[in-house]
Amino acid sequence: MAATPLQDLETVEKTSLKDHAGLSFTDFRRGLSPRYTRVFLDLLLGYACLFLSLYVPFRLGLFFPRTLPLWVLMSGFSIGYWIAYLHLFMHEAAHYNIAPDRKWNDFLSNLFISSWSGQNTASYRAIHWDHHRFLGQPNDTEHSYFNALNLRFLLGSLTGFSALKVVLFRGKKLEKQRTLLDRLMPAAGLALNGLVVWALIRMNARPFALAWAMGIVLFFPFFGALRQLLEHRGEKADPRIDYSQVPHGKVSRMFKEGPLDSLLGAAGFTRHLLHHWDPQISYTRLAEVERFLKDTELGAGLSTARTTYLRTFFKLFEW
């Protein structure tokens, strides 16, 4: 495959990179500590929208009972979208960027983020770091981009089949190093989601208990798989090639800050290219990194690297 912006970035020595004022990237980077208030507010936004994903369709269903199935479907879709949004912050926790103390970082992530999917942040961290080490290689541990973007992929993601494959793959990777917390988190996830379903039934909102189940089981994994594919699949990737056997090559993208992109690519995923270049920088500071790089020899290349999730979808989609 042709070189990508990510490969172009990796050819640059960070210690010698300077802006036009002579400030080195090494010195600039020292001041980029995470902004934890921003993380808190972004998570609060996710939870507020998750609540509205139930409340608004429920109220509309009361006013327009004949269209209740539509509101239930829209609720499930929105629940899946906002759970996927919240889940992006487990990625930030994997890089120790949601709390100053590492133990608190993992505790808060397990309590408020990864509990919805029943994952242990510490174990996810091990899997995710191999994604950084082996991006574009057959042994990449986060590899939905190995699949062609077609109807088969979309149906597999929407039916939960792709999610099941991911769960089985990660279970196999962790089989020999599974901790007590690894065993408890799936049960905690089932209990938490079961509690939500039970509460909705008790509130005489049974259709929206179904909406919650649809959101968690179908739409949440769909958004996660699709987002990852759009971030890493190359435009010249061959659908006939099995990339679990043949290297795909490193591809990572920058997305514009529109309403759709900023939410689908929350927690810094719109600047995923920069994240893969320097993984430990908090997403709350990536905008500053981009501004710094635009004032260096890399500026012209970064300016042309921007795209949108929707544009990338239509470029990659194959009938």
Image: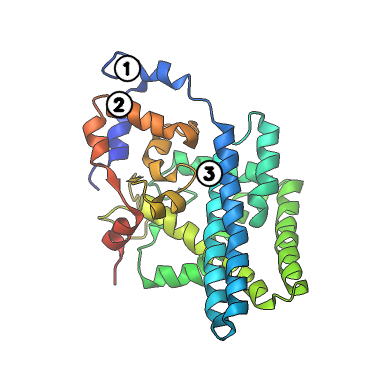
| Residue in the image at 73% along x and 59% along y | 192
Specify the amino acid type for callout 1.
Ser
| Residue in the image at 63% along x and 29% along y | 100
- The residue wearing badge 1 is 16
Inter-mark Cα distance, 2 to 3: 24 Å
Pointer 2 with pointer 1, Cβ within 8 A: yes
Inter-mark Cα distance, 2 to 1: 8 Å
Name the spot of residue 279 as percent of width and height, x first: 46, 34
Residue 194 placement, left or right of 162: right
Q: Camera-side residue: 21 or 122? A: 21
Residue 149 placement, left or right of 110: left
The secondary structure type at the circle numbered 2 is loop
CA neighbours of label 1 inside 10 A, class few (<14), some (14 to 19), many (20+)? few
The secondary structure type at the circle numbered 1 is helix
Residue 196 placement, left or right of 41: right
* Image mark for residue 128: 3
Specify the amino acid type for callout 2.
Val
